[in-house]
């Protein structure tokens, strides 16, 4: 149970960390830095989708309130990640992990598979985030550039977050 | 187990929709750009949804619409039948001369007209088959141009007003003195009004009308305007008239027949 308790504490701290990132580490309009999709993906599989969505919504909303962004933006973008979380894990890491409600990690499931699932989650998040943030006012090339740069940064961050939050890799 | 899974999907979907809508709503009120954009999107979705539901509603009300159209068709068919009947009657009427008072009017076209001799004539494309009788007048809306002299089955021959022995009873103004008007003998739109008493006042430009005293032409047809005048034998005026109708360009005329003409002539002969 130690790991479970540690997870939620870490999760809470990462929400704070994301708020700090949103306030102080937005270096360019071309990049969106967010660890939220990776955090949601790492929520233990024992947690049902409904609860996961509520947690994701609350997390996104908390980040929105604590940062200078538009309220509801992170919440709206992260909800589809929470909804599709189990499907993504099932698709990339196999049915067994869902059936056993086991945790996943780079060591157990392989870095490439885990990163594929994470990348897809980050992609879903970024697509929605960039579309909602642009509100139809930004040209396609800008959104595409923003997506590409943000994707590179956030996949890297997702790897770090996965390593921090997944059970077997925690030391 | 499957049922449980389905319920789980439905609950997840419902929670997702609820939370997403809540998030979008917050986003809408949080940012001006997002507000405009999402409002536009919501309106488009609403329009599509309402349009779709309207289409569905229309689909289910097709029977009612069909019944209404069938009823409307029946009513329209009835009205069409009525109108056809009226039109048929009017067509029958159009084969008959138009009646107004004692006069019968028949439209006709000039088939031939002579203008350059001392005794001019007009041939029209209507004859006895069309109800034309000898002694009928030929008029236009601006002149009395002749009298039917001979009638064939399909054509009639008329003496033109441009004949020395032809005169029309005319009146100066609507209630002025009456006198006979004859052709001046040389111009296509000139005439002379004679026997106007010298004490009568008139002015150049006054209009001359048919008097209606003859049994051929109805009263009140405008014929022309007064021009120069001169006193003849110290008793009456001869007045030059400029006719409205130009005989060189007239083509469509109306044959006018006094239906009481025979009775009038019979009375005259007693």
Image: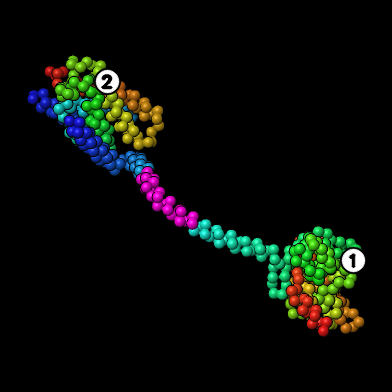
Which of the two residues, B244 or B30, is positioned nearer the viewer here? B244
The residue depicted at 28 percent of the width and 37 percent of the height is A70
User: What secondary structure is marked by label 2?
Assistant: helix
What is the x, y in percent for residue B15?
22, 37
The residue depicted at 23 percent of the width and 30 percent of the height is A82
What is the x, y in percent for residue A41?
21, 26
Question: Which quadrant of the figure has residue B190?
Answer: bottom right
Quarter that holds the N terminus of chain B: top left
The residue depicted at 46 percent of the width and 53 percent of the height is B69
Select label 1 or label 2 by which is in front: 1
User: What secondary structure is marked by label 1?
Assistant: strand
Which of the two residues, B59 or A143, is positioned nearer the viewer here? B59
Query: For the stretch drawn in magenta, what is the main secondary structure?
Result: helix
Q: Confirm whether residue A9 shows in the render.
A: yes
The residue depicted at 31 percent of the width and 32 percent of the height is A128
Reading the image, the residue beneath label 2 is A116
Q: Relative to A120, does residue B120 appear above or below in the rendering?
A: below
Is A120 within the magenta? no
Which of the two residues, A80 or B51, is positioned nearer the viewer here? B51
Reading the image, the residue beneath label 1 is B119
The CA span between labels 1 and 2 is 115 Å
Furthest residue toward left? A1
Question: Which quadrant of the figure has residue B254?
Answer: bottom right
Q: Relative to A115, does residue B132 appear above or below in the rendering?
A: below
Chain letter of disc 1 in the image: B
A154 with respect to B160 (left or right) = left
Q: How many labels does the image show?
A: 2
Quarter that holds the C terminus of chain B: bottom right
Q: Give the range drawn in magenta.
A: B52-74
Chain letter of disc 2 in the image: A
Q: Confirm whether residue B206 shows in the render.
A: no
Circle 1 Cα neighbour tier, 10 Å, few/some/many (<14 / 14–19 / ≥20): some
């Amino acid at each position: 149970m130690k790991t479970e308790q540690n997870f939620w504490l870490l999760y809470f701290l990462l929400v704070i960390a994301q708020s700090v990132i949103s306030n102080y580490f937005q270096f360019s309009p071309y990049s969106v830095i967010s660890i939220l999709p990776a955090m949601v993906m790492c929520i233990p599989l024992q947690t049902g989708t409904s609860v996961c969505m509520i947690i994701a919504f609350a997390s996104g909303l908390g980040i929105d309130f604590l940062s200078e962004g538009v309220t509801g933006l992170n919440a709206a973008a992260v909800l589809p990640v929470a909804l599709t979380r189990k499907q993504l894990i099932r698709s990339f890491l196999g049915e067994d992990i869902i059936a056993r409600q086991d945790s996943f990690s780079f060591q157990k499931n392989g870095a490439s598979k885990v990163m594929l699932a994470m990348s897809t989650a980050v992609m879903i998040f970024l697509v929605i985030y960039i579309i909602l943030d642009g509100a139809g006012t930004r040209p396609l090339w800008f959104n595409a550039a923003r997506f590409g740069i943000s994707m590179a940064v956030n996949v890297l961050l997702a790897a770090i977050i996965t390593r921090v939050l997944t059970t077997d890799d925690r030391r | 187990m499957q049922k449980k899974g389905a319920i789980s999907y439905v609950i997840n979907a419902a929670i997702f929709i609820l939370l997403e809508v809540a998030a979008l709503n917050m986003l809408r009120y949080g940012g001006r750009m997002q507000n405009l954009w999402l409002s536009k999107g919501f309106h488009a979705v609403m329009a599509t949804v309402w349009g779709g539901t309207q289409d569905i509603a229309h689909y289910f009300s097709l029977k009612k619409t069909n019944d209404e159209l069938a009823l409307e068709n029946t009513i329209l068919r009835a009205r069409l039948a009525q109108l056809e009947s009226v039109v048929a009657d009017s067509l029958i009427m159009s084969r008959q001369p138009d009646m107004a008072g004692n006069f019968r009017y028949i439209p006709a076209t000039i088939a031939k007209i002579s203008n350059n001799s001392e005794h001019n004539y007009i041939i029209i494309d209507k004859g006895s088959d069309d109800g034309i009788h000898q002694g009928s007048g030929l008029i236009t809306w601006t002149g009395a141009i002749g009298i039917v002299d001979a009638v064939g089955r399909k054509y009639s021959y008329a003496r033109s007003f441009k004949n020395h022995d032809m005169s029309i009873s005319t009146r100066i103004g609507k209630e002025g003195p009456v006198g006979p008007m004859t052709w001046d003998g040389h111009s296509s739109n000139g005439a002379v009004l004679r026997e106007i008493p010298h004490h009568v006042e008139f002015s150049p430009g006054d209009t001359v009308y048919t008097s209606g005293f003859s049994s051929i032409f109805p009263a009140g047809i405008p014929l022309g305007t007064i021009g120069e005048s001169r006193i003849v034998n110290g008793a009456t005026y001869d007045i030059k008239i400029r006719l409205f109708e130009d005989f060189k360009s007239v083509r469509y005329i109306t044959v006018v027949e006094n239906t009481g003409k025979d009775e009038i002539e019979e009375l005259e002969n007693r």
